[in-house]
Image (cartoon, rainbow, N blue to C red):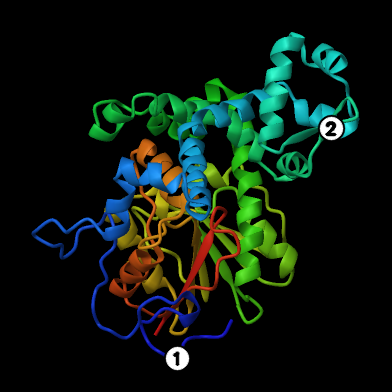
Amino acid sequence: MPKDDHKGAMDDRTSAPTGTGKQPQVPGQPGVLPVQPGRVNFFTRIALSQRLHEIFERVPLMRRVTRREGEALFDIVSGFVQSQVLLAIVEFRVLHILAGASWPLPQLAERTGLPEDRLAVLMQAAAALKLVKFRRGLWQLAPRGAAFITVPGLEAMVRHHPVLYRDLADPVAFLKGDIEPELAGFWPYVFGPLAQEDAGLAERYSQLMADSQRVVADDTLRLVDLRDAKRVMDVGGGTGAFLRSVAKHYPELPLTLFDLPHVLSVADRFSPKLDFAPGSFRDDPIPQGADVITLVRVLYDHPDSVVEPLLAKVHAALPPGGRLIVSEAMAGGAKPDRACDIYFAFYTMAMSSGRTRSPEEIKQMLEKAGFSKVSKPRTLRPFITSVIEAERG
């Protein structure tokens, strides 16, 4: 991958501020803030006027604008119902049924076990979401529905969402910190010692993590070039889903998987080029020997008090010129992103352990740890992952 010649600056492909020497303000994070409230801007004042809304409805050009905004607002209001429609479609396996053949409503009702009148409502809702379509008296799978059932891990994640939604049932109490989120104890239970009491649960969610990690790995490896790497070490890499993808792209590349001993005990040694390095990045130094270290969906699982020393350990483990690759969903910062600043931000808040960070925040943490030449390739699918590379000078 081409490197930026400007030390400590992000690649100009991101249009991130560089070379100013100033710390940019990041929405939602501490910084130098105005001491007085600002004025409401002109267009917002217009939007606050009910009288102007009524006038705009009489003007053809403005009518289109106001109605488009109205539709967008209702889409926000109805978002929870849309997610529950999707969950019902998944639980009744409607998309899988239609993947085999198109069906009229009565036969589809028999296959799902739903009353026809209720199934009709569900199918209309699914059609509005463009998951299915109705043609010549038959319900058919739409392209969006077909894509949904082919994305690894997506159905399993939808089935997992009730855990998160129970935490968000009272968003006021959730945001005030008045409840103990169920999600905060969920993943430690799934992958902790208690999981031995429910092996099926651990196996199911281990597969979910592996499936979703494969999609993240595919996007990551499209953005980074490892042809010159001598050894890649994945820190906190679980059972090796990311390195498995690396091995497929670079079969001769030596690999190291660093994670807790009990995690590595169930990992598959899928390549003769793979070494295991048991340890805790909280308590132990990162082993040396790799010239590329990856942190894939690791940082946003942890608070700054864990991330900052981790980055310092990674920096110490790399040789001069060695690279760190960070890959995870990142907040939009000054340009909020629907997927990352809504879904991932609230998910990590419910986990009570980490938080999503913007690329600019991660850049600042990397520079504090001693890294230089921080670059961010243009993201393919920010709702899947974004990538930042940094070099030890």
User: Is 193 situated left or right of 273 in this image?
Assistant: left
Which quadrant does the C terminus fall into?
A: bottom left
Q: Amino acid at mark 1?
A: Asp
Residue 233 quadrant = bottom right
Q: Is residue 114 visible?
A: no
User: Is 114 situated left or right of 61 in this image?
Assistant: right
- Percent position (x, y) of residue 243? 63, 59
Question: Within 10 angstroms of label 2, few (less than 14), some, or many (20 or more) residues?
Answer: many
Disc with the residue nearer the chain's start (1 vs 2): 1
Callout 2: helix, strand or loop?
A: strand
Judged from this view, the residue extending furthest toward the left is 35
Q: Is residue 216 above or below residue 122?
A: below
Question: Within 10 angstroms of label 1, few (less than 14), some, or many (20 or more) residues?
Answer: few
Residue in view at x 69 percent, y 13 percent = 118
Q: Amino acid at mark 2?
A: Gln
- Percent position (x, y) of residue 299? 41, 55
User: Is 301 situated left or right of 214 in this image?
Assistant: left
Residue on which disc 1 sits: 5
Residue on which disc 2 sits: 140
- Percent position (x, y) of residue 112? 78, 16
Q: Nearer the viewer, mark 1 or mark 2?
A: 2
- Percent position (x, y) of residue 84? 57, 26
Q: Give whichever of 123, 250 is nearer the camera.
A: 123
